[in-house]
Image (cartoon, helix red, strand yellow):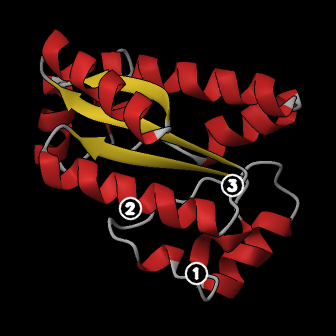
Amino acid sequence: MRGFIAELISSRHQVTVVDMEAGLEHLSRAGGTLRHVDELFIIAEMDRKALETARRTFTLAKELEIPRIGLIGNKLRDETDRKDLEQFCAEAGIELVAALAFDESTRQADRRGVALYDFDPNAITVQLLNEVVNRLEKQFDLLPSARQAYNSETKIGNS
């Protein structure tokens, strides 16, 4: 897997998005699967165990010298969750990239085994993730062809 990802990242694509399973094995000090990435998004829901795993993931990613590490909060229920997430990120020194509210469309798409983008392209989660993609396009000064490749080859899946 490591070799495949290294080859993929160095291939013709300006951007490669890899959705990894939850866990820390991708960040082993021996140079895990993610050692070649320029940016890592840690996705975490608002429970103690998930946030502690996010903190450990952040620490390991820094040890691997991943240039940019950010956190995306997932399935936030209310403003209290948002404030708690902001406080967690501030205390841990992690950039908060996005805070995704709980979205019933996501649950329904998952139940049907369909990508959220196909189930409800106007869902709030799709809109927020598109904002993240737009920000990354600007940050990395991506060419329009990269966006076209993203739209034709990738669909936003269930989180």
Q: Residue furthest front?
A: 91
**Secondary structure under the numbered disc 3 in the rendered image:** loop
> In terms of depth relative to the viewer, which is nearer, 138 or 40?
40
Asked if residue 66 is positioned above or below residue 39 in the image, the reply reads below
Give the spatial CA distance, label 3 vs label 1. 17 Å
Q: Position of residue 54 (x, y in %)?
A: 35, 53
Name the side, left or right, on which 136 lies relative to 14: left
User: Which residue is rendered at x = 74% and y = 32% of the image?
Assistant: 147
Q: Earlier in the sequence, mark 3 or mark 1?
A: 3
Res. 78 in view: yes
Q: Position of residue 141 (x, y in %)?
A: 87, 29
What residue is shown with label 1?
32
Q: Is residue 158 visible?
A: no
Check residue 56 in the rendering and tell me which mark sits there, or answer none.
2
Real-space Cα separation, disc 3 to disc 2, in angstroms: 24 Å
Instruction: Say few, some or many: other residues with alpha carbon within 10 Å of mark 3 (under 14 / 14 to 19 / 20 or more).
Output: some
Tell me how far mark 2 sits from mark 1, CA to CA: 15 Å
Secondary structure found at label 1: loop
Image-quadrant location for residue 31: bottom right
The residue located at (48%, 55%) in the rendering is 58
Task: Determine which quarter of the picture holds residue 150.
Answer: top right
N-terminal label among 2 and 1: 1
User: Residue type at mark 2?
Assistant: Arg
- Disc 3 target residue: 16
The residue under label 3 is which amino acid type?
A: Thr
Residue at the image position 82 percent from the left and 34 percent from the top: 140
